[in-house]
Amino acid sequence: MSATLGVMLKELSPNLEIKLFEKLSKPAEESSNEWNNAGTGHSALCEMNYTKEESDGSVNIDKAIQINEQFQLSKQFWTYLVNQGQLTNPEDFIRPVPHMSFVYGDHNIEFLKKRCDALSKNPLFNGMTFTDDFETLKHWMPLMMEGRPSHDKIAATKIESGTDVNFGNLTRSLFDDLQDKGVELNFNHSVQNLRRNQDNTWQLKIYNSETKTTEYHNANFVFIGAGGGSLPLLQKTGIKQASNIGGFPVSGLFMVCNNDEVIAKHDAKVYGKAKVGAPPMSVPHLDTRYIEGKRSLLFGPFAGFSPKFLKTGSNIDLLGSVKPNNVLTMLSAGLKEMGLTKYLVEQVLLSDEKRLEELKEFIPNAKLEDWEIVVAGQRVQVIKDTKEGGKGTLQFGTELVTSDDGSISALLGASPGASTAVHVMLQLLEKCFPQDFPQWEDKIKQMIPSFRLQLSDHPDLFDEINSSTSKALGLYK
């Protein structure tokens, strides 16, 4: 997110002075790192939690369209940067990988069929197909069908336009571009405090761990894009928007295949349905990934609990985030989310054999010796008071918190995260730079041709843009 914002600002206003401060020694070591996220170009092609089954049995696809539209913006922006020569070798950060949804049982099969019928009528989901035919499924996902009884009631949808995104490589490439444009990148620098100056600018107190010295920097605008570390920094700002907001950290684990023969038998991102009572972030998926230049296969996520807000954080992060202005919100969430607490406890106590049982729902012939555990990133879910959910409502989306004057903004939350970075940063630019934004719009449309439009309402434009992005990003299979 931070890299995206920096690149966009430099395109829109090349003379801006921008400084980046990162606590770690290099970029993309936390949430953006390729081992710390699902690497899915989230566009609701396979993620069933974005399509809700209504009480009358119909399937509401509004959220799916919204998520897909947002990812289209990201692809257009990356295409612009590739065509400008600012991003090179797109295969290093994005590759075509089919997206599939996979379900068990009569009710889920009926839901999936209705979901496919509803989505496939929309241009954004053109090409999505459904099958419950055993032989077709063997062709689509051979690894998942080996050893599976032919009487199993299963079904899947498939669409070829899915992507695997290496957000770590993408982030590093964006920072390389920023450095080429004169942006000052300061690693091993941790922000310790933020306070507002009398002229409404901001002073940042920053510790340089290389020189063991404290520095002070002033800025007209500050963006806090520190993943799980954003909430503690936001709380230090003292802006009223930071009141009554808390965070709940959830860690993740993936099973990673170490057998090349097994990896070669699967070419898709296959998403299942979360178990009844489990949170959306627990949706099981078996993913073809491209990490460190080679094809990989990951299964998960398995949730865990750590009081840290970052993998490199402190065990007192959660306790330290409880303040007088959010303690009631946090307590209310604790009472309301007993189901989540139970789920996390169960996940933490899972043995390798129990994890293998869950994997076998996807790969019946899976063997434990072919898989190892990798600890993924920390996600801090936002807790806040809402009209709909009341006090202490747990949020599962991505959220911008901005001061009234737009001089400071922080990004909180997680899913669908980096996939929607361009959409979120456009929102930030419009909110925080209201004087400049009207003059920027022509340039934004040059970078993102569908800006201010819904591609689902303009199928001809979508075909044109989809063709150009697929060509530039190498997404033809």
Image (cartoon, rainbow, N blue to C red):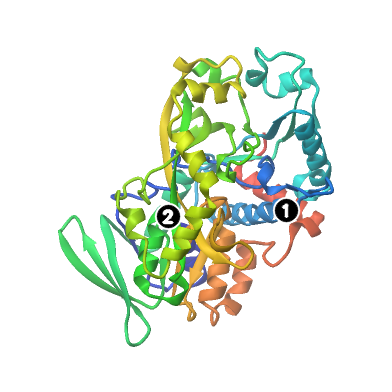
The answer to whether residue 354 is above or below residue 33 is above
Classify the position of the C terminus by image quarter.
top right
Seen in the picture, residue 230 relative to 289 is either above or below; the reply is below
Find out whether the residues at labels 2 and 1 contact each other: C-beta distance under 8 Å.
no
Calculate the distance from the C-alpha at mark 2 to the C-alpha at mark 1. 26 Å
Q: Is residue 256 in sight in this rendering?
A: yes
Residue holding disc 2: 227
Viewer-nearest residue: 100 or 102: 102
Q: Residue at x 32, y 87 (%)?
A: 198
Of residues 357 and 327, the one drawn nearer to the viewer in this rendering:
327
Toward the bottom, the furthest residue is 199
Mark 2 residue element: helix
Left or right: residue 106 compared with residue 212:
right
Q: Earlier in the sequence, mark 2 or mark 1?
A: 1
Q: Is residue 85 visible?
A: no
State the residue position of label 1.
Answer: 65
